Image (cartoon, helix red, strand yellow):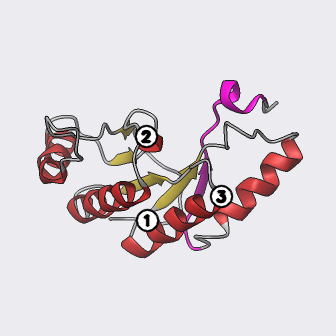
Amino acid sequence: MASDGKRLKGLIAATFTPMTLNCEVNLSIIQQYVDYLVQKQKIKNIFVNGTTGEGTSLSVTERKKLAEEWVRHARGKMDNVIVHVGCLSLEETKDLAAHAASCGANAIAAVSPSFIKPSSPDALVLYLKEVASAAPSLPFYYYHIPCLTGITCE
């Protein structure tokens, strides 16, 4: 995957998480999904484990396996795999961030905690810095959902 430190170009597809009829993550379909996005949709960037993929409903182990598979199958076919790492737990979020870096993701993103919300924009920034520090070699994107945080960016 290409990661030249420049701005993202083109569309970023928010991927769904393929599941079996038994509600287990279906890793076997990811290669086909990547090929479909690249060949039929001309997509070169993906956002994995976000809200479209119900990432926060999955276990840390499931999210790690998904990140690994998306990165593995996108290598050489896509420009960027951005892995959403946000969780309610800061430690789990940092663990997922470090894992994304180690498995070859091009960037990470995180939504702010939504249960115990940041008390101010400054508190949010401190939280996000902590998350980003777990994968210092990767670009970091804040996944802004104001209705979850109660904080607006102006």
Q: Secondary structure at mark 1?
A: loop
In front: 4, or 133? 133
Magenta stretch encompasses residue 89: no
Of discs 1 and 3, which sits in the foreground? 3
At x 20%, y 60%, the residue is: 73
**Residue under pointer 2:** 57
**Residue under pointer 3:** 90
Q: Secondary structure at mark 2?
A: helix
Q: Secondary structure at mark 3?
A: helix
Local crowd at mark 1 within 10 Å, few (<14), some, or many (≥20)?
some
At x 21%, y 34%, the residue is: 41
- Distance between mark 1 and mark 2 Cα atoms: 29 Å
**Residue under pointer 1:** 3
- Distance between mark 3 and mark 2 Cα atoms: 16 Å
At x 43%, y 57%, the residue is: 60
Disc nearer the start of the sequence (1/3): 1
- Distance between mark 1 and mark 3 Cα atoms: 27 Å
The segment highlighted magenta reads 137-150
Disc nearer the start of the sequence (1/2): 1
Q: Position of residue 58 (x, y in %)?
A: 39, 46
Q: Looking at the rendered structure, which numbered label has been put on residue 37?
A: none
The amino acid type found where label 1 is placed reads Ser
Q: Position of residue 4 (x, y in %)?
A: 47, 66
Local crowd at mark 3 within 10 Å, few (<14), some, or many (≥20)?
some
Q: Position of residue 15 (x, y in %)?
A: 33, 39
